[in-house]
Image (cartoon, rainbow, N blue to C red):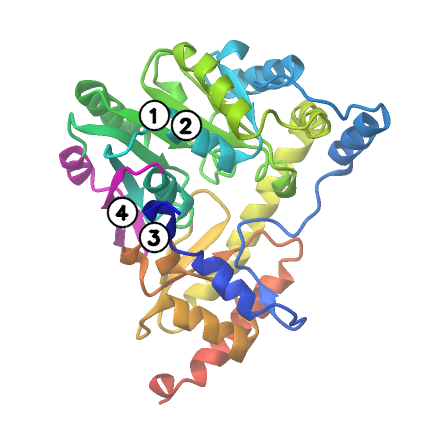
């Protein structure tokens, strides 16, 4: 086995979840998905596709109908994007990995903004790249970008910059000025940008087009920019494993080859489901976002009222990221919470060393009352700790 694979760290989130397997009394908020099932209109489209016998291979880049639908969907939110620049992938994870495979070679210099979902730093490491990180800085619980530090880190030797915003786990969202500064700098250095914008519709700030700022708003088609998306979050389709890439025209054929050698193509029935999801965006996504905002606004004040908790409301995404003062190893705390409190959270150090002492709480709960119960369990557990007494 290659040394890069041998050295990969196992998922700390899965490690915590494994500690709670088989326990019906655990309130689980560790994974980044809603507990609400995919809307019926989407499921029905997949069923009808299967009933028609659509069980064969599709085009490597996706069904033409779906590529056109994604292009219309994207162009309604951002400057027009042609369907020829869209590649359909077997999940957002696959979209990210394909982009990294296309751009990164062994020994390349890659910079990532962290804390971040661990796949984003693991993928270039799998390719043998040297991955450096630029940490966000927490200010009164709100994570912010150190733009001078990022500019200093990204040099002409840097092949790829990876940015996830709205961010998992912190909820940090880039401002338009930050995006422009980063894009301008990367144009000067010749650095590619891989922008993971899967949470762009899960945005809670006022916005004219109901989404977070995107690099697509300010870029040119031939910029060294790859944007990744997924149907998982905004359409409640995590288990369907379907995503897409927005690519510079010159990259499309190469990505098609990589899809052939990775997964061949996305399944047709999931693509039919995605076409239905886009057709019903107006009724699905605003409801999802409104409910997530309700969940966020239910959880955050309750957490803020717990002594020793430091956090700030997320501007986007589906997570509350908070610090427990007086506690060290996040993984140890998360495991103890499962066993001793029946509460399942993700450890902050799963996302970066600088997030040690923090915990991620996915608030995408169909029933917000589960969030209330979860905070009560956290409060009771903290009150029982020796360092908390008195």
Q: Residue at x 61, y 49 (%)?
A: 34
User: Residue 329 versus residue 386: which sits nearer the camera?
Assistant: 329
User: Residue 143 versus residue 18: which sits nearer the camera?
Assistant: 18
Q: Earlier in the sequence, mark 3 or mark 4?
A: 3
Q: x, y percentage for residue 282?
A: 65, 27
Find the distance from the CA under tag 2 to the CA under tag 1.
6 Å
Q: Which quarter of the picture shows residue 50?
A: top right
Q: x, y percentage for residue 165?
A: 39, 37
Q: Earlier in the sequence, mark 4 or mark 1?
A: 1
Task: Say above or below: 64 vs 107.
Answer: above
Mark toward the viewer: 1 or 3: 3
Question: For the residue labelled by badge 3, is the local secondary structure a helix, a strand or a loop?
Answer: loop
Question: For the residue labelled by badge 1, is the local secondary structure a helix, a strand or a loop?
Answer: helix
Q: Which quarter of the picture shows residue 353?
A: bottom left
Q: Which residue is mark 2?
A: 99
- Callout 1 touching callout 3 (CB < 8 Å): no
Q: Label 1 neighbourhood size at 10 Å, few (<14), some (14-19), many (20+)?
A: some
Find the distance from the CA under tag 3 to the CA under tag 4.
25 Å
Q: Which residue is mark 4?
A: 136
Q: x, y percentage for residue 281?
A: 65, 28
Find the distance from the CA under tag 4 to the CA under tag 1.
25 Å
Q: On the picture, is 383 further left or further right than 7? A: right
Q: Residue at x 34, y 37 (%)?
A: 124
Question: For the residue labelled by badge 4, is the local secondary structure a helix, a strand or a loop?
Answer: loop
Question: For the residue labelled by badge 2, is the local secondary structure a helix, a strand or a loop?
Answer: helix
Indicate whether residue 150 is drawn in magenta.
yes
Find the distance from the CA under tag 2 to the CA under tag 4.
24 Å
Q: Which residue is mark 1?
A: 103
Q: Earlier in the sequence, mark 1 or mark 3?
A: 3
């Amino acid at each position: 086995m290659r040394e890069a694979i041998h050295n990969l760290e196992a998922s700390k989130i899965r490690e915590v979840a494994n500690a709670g397997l088989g326990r019906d009394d655990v309130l689980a908020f560790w994974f980044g998905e809603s507990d609400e099932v995919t809307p019926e209109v989407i499921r029905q489209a997949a069923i009808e596709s299967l009933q028609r016998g659509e069980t064969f291979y599709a085009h490597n880049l996706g069904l033409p109908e779906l590529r056109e639908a994604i292009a219309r969907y994207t162009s309604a939110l951002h400057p027009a994007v042609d369907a020829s620049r869209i590649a359909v992938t077997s999940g957002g994870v696959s979209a990210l990995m394909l982009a990294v495979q296309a751009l990164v070679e062994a020994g390349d210099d890659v910079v990532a903004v962290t804390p971040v979902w661990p796949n984003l730093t693991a993928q270039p490491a799998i390719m043998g790249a040297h991955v450096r990180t630029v940490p966000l800085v927490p200010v009164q619980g709100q994570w912010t970008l150190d733009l001078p530090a990022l500019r200093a880190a990204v040099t002409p030797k840097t092949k790829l910059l990876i940015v996830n915003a709205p961010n998992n786990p912190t909820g940090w969202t880039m401002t338009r000025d930050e995006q422009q500064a980063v894009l301008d700098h990367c144009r000067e250095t010749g650095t590619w940008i891989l922008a993971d914008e899967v949470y762009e519709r899960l945005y809670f700030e006022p916005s004219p087009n109901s989404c977070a700022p995107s690099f697509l708003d300010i870029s040119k088609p031939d910029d060294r920019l790859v944007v990744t998306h997924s149907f998982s979050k905004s359409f409640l389709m995590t288990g369907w494993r379907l995503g897409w890439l927005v690519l510079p025209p010159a990259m499309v054929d190469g990505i098609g080859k990589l899809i052939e050698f990775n997964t061949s193509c996305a399944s047709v029935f999931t693509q039919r489901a995605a076409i239905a999801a886009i057709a019903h965006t107006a009724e699905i996504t605003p409801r999802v976002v409104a409910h997530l905002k309700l969940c966020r606004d239910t959880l955050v004040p309750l957490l803020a009222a717990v002594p020793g908790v430091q956090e700030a409301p997320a501007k986007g995404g589906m997570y509350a990221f908070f610090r427990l003062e007086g506690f060290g190893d996040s993984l140890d705390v998360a495991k103890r919470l499962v066993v001793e409190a029946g509460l399942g959270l993700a450890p902050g150090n799963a996302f970066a060393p600088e997030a040690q002492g923090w915990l991620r709480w996915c608030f995408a709960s169909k029933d917000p009352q589960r969030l209330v119960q979860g905070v009560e369990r956290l409060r009771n557990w903290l009150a029982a700790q020796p360092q908390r007494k008195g």
